[in-house]
Amino acid sequence: MNKKRVVITGLGVASSVGLGIDETFDALVEKKCGVRRVEAFDPSAFQSQIAGEIVELNVKDFIFKKYNKHARVMARDIELAVAAAYNAIKDAGLKSKCLVDRGEAEAVDIDSTRFGANIGAGLICADLSELAEALGTAAENPAEKGNRRFSLGKWGEAMTNLTPLWLLKFLPNMLACHVTIVHDCQAPSNTITCGEASSHLAIGEAFRTIQRGAADLCICGGAESKVNPMAMIRPELWHRVATNRNHDPARACRPFDADRSGMVVGEGGGLLILEEYEHAKARGARIYGEVCGFGASQNNSSWFRPQPDGRALRLASEKAMADAGVTSDEIDLVNPFGVGTKEHDAGEAAAIRSLFGNRTNEVPVLATKGAIGNNGAGSGAIDIAVVVKAMERGVAPPSLNTDKIDPDCGINVIQNDPIDLRAKTALTFAGAMSGGQTGALVIRRMES
C-alpha cells in the first residue's frame, strides 16, 4: 500500500512568552523569558517558587459565544488546548465551525468527517479551592483543628460538596473532547497520556492516521499546566526543580549548562495541523514542512532515573530516521527535550552523541526550556512548532541561560544569539521524565 504524504499546514501555540507561533518564536529569538514568580497562588511554601506561567489567557477569546457556558468545566489544561487549537486553525487558513460561529468566516470549508484529532494530556490537577470544602467534610475529628485526618470512609459523603460536573474538568480526554466539539472534528480522535513524550506520540499517531487514509486533516499535539500546587510538589519531592534562583527566575532553567541545577515547571500547549499532501495542495494551503518519519520506544529502566546512555531516545530516533529513509548524516538540526536537570540532559546528550558520532559538534541543538520551562505534555508540540518555524525562517533561537555547555554533555547547543540556519531536515525527540515512552519525529522543510 502506498503511504500518503503528510505535511504541516498550521502551527498553534500558547506559551509563557506568547500566544501564537509568531509571538512565541519572536520572543525566543529576542531572548525573552516567560519564567517568573508564580502569580496563580502563593508559592512561598515551596522551595521553587517560579514557573513559566501564562498570565493573561481568556478561553472565551478562542471559542464561540454559545459555547461560553462550557468554559465553566474547563480546567487550565483544557483552556490551553482550546487556545492552541484556535491558533492552529487560523494559522492553517481553515474555516472551521468555530470560526463561522464567531463571525470570522462565512462558511465551513472542512469535511468534518475527515478531520481527526490526537492530543496529548498530562495528569490534570484539581483546583484546591474546589476540593477544600469536600476535604473538610471528609475529616475525622472536625472539631479538633490540630488533630484532623482525612477519612476515606467519609469521602463519598464529602463528594456531595462538589458540583455534579466537577469530574469533567479533570479527565485527560477532555482536551480532545472540547477541541473536537468546538471545531467539529468527526474523524478518528485519540488521547495520549505519556508524560513529556505525549505530544510527540500524539503527532506520530496523527501522522499514521493520515498515512493510512483514515483522515485528510488532523489537529494534534498536547497541552498541560504544571502551575498548580499539586503539580509543583511532585518534581520538588523528586529533587528535580531548580531551587537556587527564586530571586532571579529568568536565569533559573539552564539546559545543558555546566551550572544547571534543575528544571522549572511551566504551562503551555502546542497543536499542529497535519494534512494529506494532495489535500493541502488542492486548497492552496501554505505548507511549512513534511512529517516524514516517526519512531517510538520504551524506557523500562526506572521510574525515577533516566537512562544514562539515552538508549530509548536513540532507538526511537533511529526508528524515525529509518521510517523517513534518512541517515544521521542528513540531519541538520536536533531538538531534544532539554529540561535542565543534570541527569536528563546528560542522557539526552549521550543519545545525541551515539546518533551522530563524529558529526556531534557540527549539528546544532535547539532547546527552549530556558525561556518557557517544562510544560509537560504540551512541551513537545511547542518545541516542534518552534523547529518548523525555524526551518521556515532560516533562523534558530538560542537556548536561554546555556552560558557554558557542560563538557560532559559535549553537544552543539545553540547559545548566546540566534543563528542563521537553512536546515533541510530536523530530528526532534522527547521521553517521559518518569520513565515509560519515548517518541521521535523527522521533519523535512518544503522547498518552494
Image (cartoon, rainbow, N blue to C red):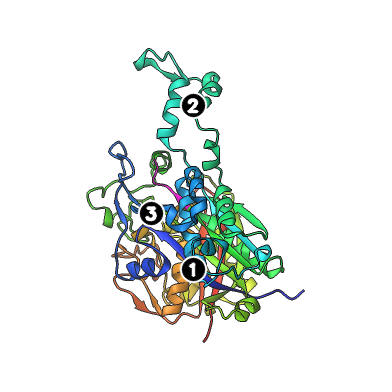
- Mark closest to the chain's N terminus, 3 or 1: 3
Q: Is residue 261 left or right of residue 345?
A: left
Q: CA distance from mark 3 to mark 2?
A: 28 Å
Residue that appears at 32% across and 64% down: 400
Question: Regarding mark 2 in the picture, which secondary structure is present there?
Answer: helix
- Residue type at mark 3: give it: Leu
Query: Which residue has dot 2 on it?
Result: 161
Query: Which residue has dot 1 on it?
Result: 90
- Residues in magenta, as a range: 224-228
Outermost bottom residue: 448
- Residue type at mark 1: give it: Lys
Looking at this view, is 104 or 440 the one in front? 104
Q: Quadrant of the N terminus?
A: bottom right
Instruction: Give the image quarter of residue 140.
Output: top left
Residue that appears at 60% across and 63% down: 204
Badge 1 density bin: few <14, some 14–19, many ≥20, Cα 10 Å? some
Q: Position of residue 242 (x, y in %)?
A: 33, 49
Q: Position of residue 274 (x, y in %)?
A: 58, 69
Q: CA distance from mark 1 to mark 2?
A: 40 Å
Residue 269 appears in the picture as rendered: yes
Instruction: Give the image quarter of residue 235.
Output: top left
Instruction: Give the image quarter of residue 19.
Output: bottom left
- Residue type at mark 2: give it: Asn
Query: Which residue has dot 3 on it?
Result: 57
Q: Position of residue 399 (x, y in %)?
A: 35, 66
- Mark closest to the chain's N terminus, 3 or 2: 3
